[in-house]
Image (cartoon, rainbow, N blue to C red):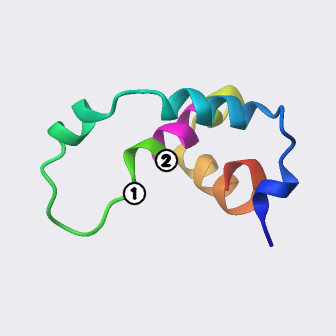
Amino acid sequence: MDLEEDIPKNHLVRVVNAAVNRLDYSIFDAAYPGGGSDSYHSKMLTIVIIYAYTQRIYSSRRIAKAVRENIPFM
């Protein structure tokens, strides 16, 4: 199943994704020392958080639930 097909071309999540992917992430990469267990990519987390805020979801638990249950968050 391809989730890309279930999201309309003009959906807000696509706008957020395109905007975040244009950002220069060298600052984040330089600030993160690495080590420990694998982390999620900072661009992916930024996209999820910004999109969640546009949907008025501010709680980290509600964001985690939306990522599990809501196709645009996936």
Q: Position of residue 34 (x, y in %)?
A: 16, 56
Badge 1 amino acid: Tyr
Query: In this image, 48 relative to 66: left or right?
Result: left
Frontmost residue, 15 versus 50: 15
Q: Secondary structure beneath disc 2?
A: helix
Can you identify the residue that label 2 sits on? Answer: 44
In the image, 9 versus 63, the foreground residue is: 9
Q: Is residue 4 above or below residue 38?
A: above
Quadrant of the rendered image containing residue 53: top right
Question: Vertically, is 13 above or below 41?
Answer: above
Identify the image quadrant of the N terminus: bottom right
Give how far across and how far down residue 11 sits, in percent.
Answer: 81, 34
Which region shows up in magenta?
A: 45-50
Dominant secondary-structure state across the stretch colored magenta: helix
Would you name the residue on which mark 1 appears? 40
* Quarter of the rendering containing residue 49: top right
Question: Between marks 1 and 2, how big is the CA–CA gap?
Answer: 7 Å
* Residue at the spot 47% in from the left edge and 38% down from the top edge: 46
Q: Depth check: give the residue in front, 60 or 44.
A: 44
Rendered location of residue 19, percent (x, y): 56, 26
For label 1, count other residues whose C-alpha is less than 10 Å away and answer few (under 14), some (14-19) or many (20+). few
For the point 63% across and 36% down, the residue is 52
Q: Amino acid at mark 2?
A: Met
